Image (cartoon, helix red, strand yellow):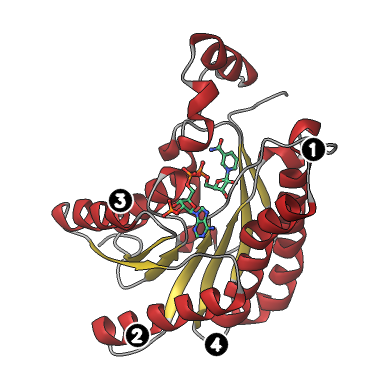
Amino acid sequence: MKRLDGKIAFVTGASRGIGKGIALRLAEDGALVAVHYGSSREAADEVVQTITERGGQAFAIGAKLESMPEIMQLIESLQAELVRLTGESRFDILVNNAGIGTSQTLEETTEENFDHIFAVNVKAPFFLVQQSLQLLRNEGRIINISSGVTRIAYPHIMAYNLTKGALNTFTLHLAQMLGPRGITVNAVLPGIVDTDVNASWLHTPEGHKHAAEMSAFGRVGETSDIADVVSFLASPDSRWVTAQLLDATGGSHL
Ligand SMILES: NC(=O)c1ccc[n+]([C@@H]2O[C@H](COP(=O)([O-])OP(=O)(O)OC[C@H]3O[C@@H](n4cnc5c(N)ncnc54)[C@H](OP(=O)(O)O)[C@@H]3O)[C@@H](O)[C@H]2O)c1
């Protein structure tokens, strides 16, 4: 018996990076996983194939997460697939992972940059939760992938930092609101993780050394480091933990 047997997880941005790691881990824990992608359909199909080859269950669903019609379309696709596979449209675990970074400083940020990053990193999780309220089962889980930048100052990526602060605040208030249903709401705050977002600078000897030195453990984070924390928060073992901002930066800048 695996700890997520019979559970259904919906992971946004699961085609690559941290989201892919989370999807693989939750499937390994026994969940049926909805692998969301924005534009990397082939990559999402590969994640589904890997899960299936390992004896798990998953399906891919795609939608850009930048506007309300796209969010509604994603929820409709999710419901349709769930009905097809399970006979009902309910699920247990929502992981709001899809997100984008920025390289603009405060001075460089345009209104367009600002609106775009807030659309993907804040508006999409907000309305995905709103549209999932009736679909999420009692005793369910919402896990928001925030960032260590809400604790550690990085003023050169100002707009991104604000989006993650908003996600932390959302976590607190949602936890209070959904407590009576036994639904826990927590955020995980990764530090630097080796994904596409960081590849341009992290895959240089100096960049890698700099990133490793930030962590108390002297190494760069891997997607599995974050997925394992999410696995705990998704599991029944975390039932008494809610509204927490779980630092998963590998002890960065202690
Ligand atoms: N990597 C880090 O160091 C780090 C640190 C702290 C926090 N985080 C957070 O962790 C989360 C995942 O980051 P990552 O590094 O794994 O990123 P990543 O490798 O760039 O993957 C991002 C994922 O989000 C999806 N996505 C991006 N823009 C989208 C859009 N407009 N519409 C729909 N889906 C979209 C992508 O889907 P497609 O490719 O299919 O479009 C992809 O699956 C983000 O919320 C990020 O802020 C990352």
The residue carrying mark 3 is 43
Whether ligand 1 has any atom under 8 Å from the Cβ at mark 3 is answered as yes
Whether ligand 1 has any atom under 8 Å from the Cβ at mark 4 is answered as no
Q: CA distance from mark 4 to mark 1?
A: 41 Å
Vertical comparison of 224 with 13: above or below? above
218 or 201, nearer to the observer: 201
Amino acid type, label 2: Ala
- Report whether residue 6 is seen: yes
- Determine crowd level at label 4: few under 14, some 14-19, many 20+ residues with C-alpha closer than 10 A: few
Q: Helix or strand or loop: what does disc 3 sit on? A: helix
Q: CA distance from mark 3 to mark 2?
A: 22 Å
Q: CA distance from mark 3 to mark 1?
A: 32 Å
Q: Is residue 188 left or right of residue 149?
A: left
Observer-side mark, 3 or 1, equals 1
Question: Residue 13's x, y, as percent?
Answer: 46, 56
Q: CA distance from mark 1 to mark 2?
A: 42 Å
Observer-side mark, 4 or 1, equals 1
Q: Earlier in the sequence, mark 4 or mark 1?
A: 1
10 or 208, nearer to the observer: 208
Q: Which mark is residue 141?
A: none
Observer-side mark, 3 or 2, equals 3
Amino acid type, label 4: Gln
CB under 8 Å between discs 4 and 1 = no
| Number of numbered discs visible in the structure rendering | 4
The residue carrying mark 2 is 80
Q: Earlier in the sequence, mark 1 or mark 2?
A: 2
Observer-side mark, 4 or 3, equals 3
